[in-house]
Amino acid sequence: MSEILKSVIDPETLSSIVELGFVKQIEEEENKIRVVLSPPTFWCPPTFLYIILEDLREKLKSKYEIVNIEVTGHHDSEKLTKCINKGLKFDECYGDEAIKGLYDNLKKRFYQRLEKGISPKNRSDKLVRLSLGITGEMCKLLAEERMKREGS
């Protein structure tokens, strides 16, 4: 179980959701699991969070018959929880709010980045490197601060 959780990577930081303190609770039975996740910030972009949720759901489904993922501490917690547990795609969950195809392109680019080991430190485009670096480091700092506050 812990290996599955550790293998789920945050697209902004390229860090494990375990390392960032996303995982708040796990309830495991025979063929059933419930995982409670809380992102480091209330305003974590739903697109990135949904990439995490889909990856986690897919990996847990390979081991458990019944998977329930609950999102807490996010401005769209209820919607994200309902959509991921229904097995909806991001565009189905966000309907008219989502630009058709943008999420799939973002997800594809993240996995390419992950596969190539591209991090903010080894990008050649200075603006992209700066943006990824600031966003990723900010997310990590917020996660660390939240873990300190919660005593995790």
Image (spheres, rainbow, N blue to C red):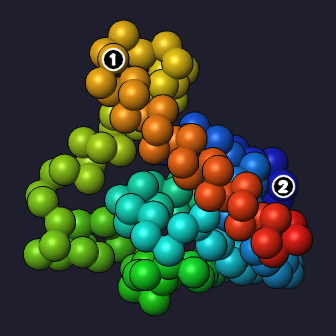
Q: Quadrant location of the N terminus?
A: bottom right
Residue at 57% of width from left, 81% of height from top?
A: 73
Residue 46: percent from the left, percent from the top?
38, 66
Read off the residue under disc 1: 126
Which residue lies most toward the top here? 124
Q: Is residue 44 left or right of residue 61?
A: left
SS at badge 2: helix
Q: Quadrant of residue 98?
A: bottom left
Residue at 33% of width from left, 17% of height from top?
A: 126
Assess disc 1: are there few (<14), some (14-19) or many (≥20) residues with their C-alpha within 10 Å of its C-alpha: few
3D distance between C-alphas at marks 2 and 1: 36 Å
Q: Quadrant location of the C terminus?
A: bottom right
Give, as a three-letter code, the residue at label 1: Lys
Q: Quadrant of residue 47?
A: bottom left
Q: Quadrant of residue 41?
A: bottom right
Mark 2 or 1, nearer chain start? 2
Q: Is residue 54 left or right of residue 27?
A: left
Residue 71: percent from the left, percent from the top?
57, 79
Q: Is residue 35 above or below residue 134?
A: below
Foreground of the two, 116 or 141: 141
Asked if the residues shown at circle 2 and circle 1 are in contact, with their CB atoms under 8 angstroms apart, the answer is no
Asked if residue 58 shows in the view, the reply is: no
Assess disc 2: are there few (<14), some (14-19) or many (≥20) residues with their C-alpha within 10 Å of its C-alpha: few
Residue 130: percent from the left, percent from the top?
39, 28
Residue 99: percent from the left, percent from the top?
12, 60
Give, as a three-letter code, the residue at label 2: Ser
Foreground of the two, 49 or 87: 49
Check residue 2 in the rendering and tell me which mark sits there, or answer none: 2
Residue at 32% of width from left, 27% of height from top?
A: 128
Check residue 77 in the rendering and tell me which mark sits there, or answer none: none
